[in-house]
Amino acid sequence: MSFLSAIHIAQQREDGVGSLLFDRSEWGRLHMKGSPGLEYLHNQSTQDLTALRPGQGAETVFVTPTAGILDLTAVYVGEEECWVWTSPQRRGPLMQSLGRMLPFVRGAQLSDETEQTFGFGLLGSASEAVLQSLIGSEQIPAEPHEHRQVEIQGIRIHLARGTGLTWPGFTLWGELSQKVPLQEYLLQAGAELGGAELWEELRLEAGRPAADRELTTDYNPLEAGLWRAISLSKGCYIGQEVLAKQVTYKRIRQTLWGIHLSGVAEPGSEIWHEEDKIGSLTSVGLTSKGYLGLGYIRTKFEPKEGLEVQVSSVPGRLARLSFLSFPPI
């Protein structure tokens, strides 16, 4: 990316306009075929997936029996199939985890299609206009996680509303052979390329937890601020009892916070408030808002917006970020 392009993209971010195209092909795309497969995924994760109709989707968290996080995913439901978008690092472990009991589910088949497909994220308020210029407005999904198959200049793809962050936009995927021509069509229609470093900045600014940082089996989805991806009323599923008790008895031990920092700090650093060690830093980076980190803070210290902390020797203050949601307790 040229220096002038970087300035232009920074201005787009500040103004909330524009359309940024991210190559998300490294994210996992697992393909479940057969109608029993949806119920199987439903029983392995936190969301009420069986309530979804073909063309709908939702975020869901796959967890261990003790509710430790395996991954935050997006599931898109079709007529006799569904797609599971995973974190890049988790596609293999999740494929292995889901495969253990799948042979006992007659009529369901799971495959990892990541290497045979591409994935794009189209972010920004002008993203819808970019797509409208290529396919018209009637084919564009309207509701969050709504998805459908569309054709762009003869290229058949899956198109879903939502970006995996809090920016408006869309997720696209299709056959790998169509990746380059589709990218060209999107750039010609007004999108601009964004790189991995910019995606990480936007992730931190939104507060989306990441695999191997905030998403590990040491934490559960309630602690990670993934309340909207959880159903406590859908009945029994792996880890459900642990999460239900934490909500019922108000025993959420720690919660994920954003931390505005006055300088750089190392992930893993202890977070202090006055004389108390109150948590640990899990991610940090330089963003358009300065240095910004994510960290788990123990609830017994009553964390709140603006609370002044020290991360190692670096001053900071807590911030509630837009991606995070917590139970009303």
Image (spheres, helix red, strand yellow):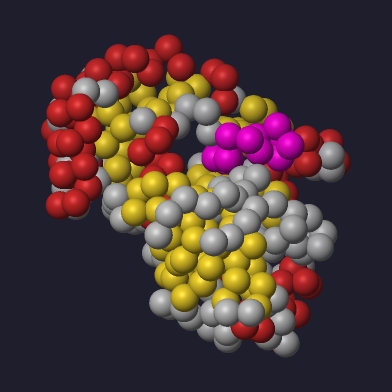
Place residue 236 in its image quadrant. bottom right
Specify the quadrant that holds the N terminus: top left
Q: Is residue 49 above or below residue 98?
A: below
Specify the quadrant that holds the C terminus: bottom right
Image location (x, y in percent) of residue 82: 57, 41
Whether residue 17 is visible, yes or no, is: yes
Whether residue 149 is visible, yes or no, is: no
Left or right: residue 232 compared with residue 320: right
* Residue appearing at x 21%, y 42% in the figure: 10
Residue nearest the viewer, comparing 85 with 8:
8
Q: Which residues are magenta?
A: 83-95
Image location (x, y in percent) of residue 139: 26, 40
Image location (x, y in percent) of residue 322: 39, 64
Any magenta on residue 75?
no
* Residue appearing at x 36%, y 38% in the figure: 198
Place residue 60 in its image quadrant. bottom right
Left or right: residue 98 compared with residue 38: right
Left or right: residue 16 compared with residue 236: left
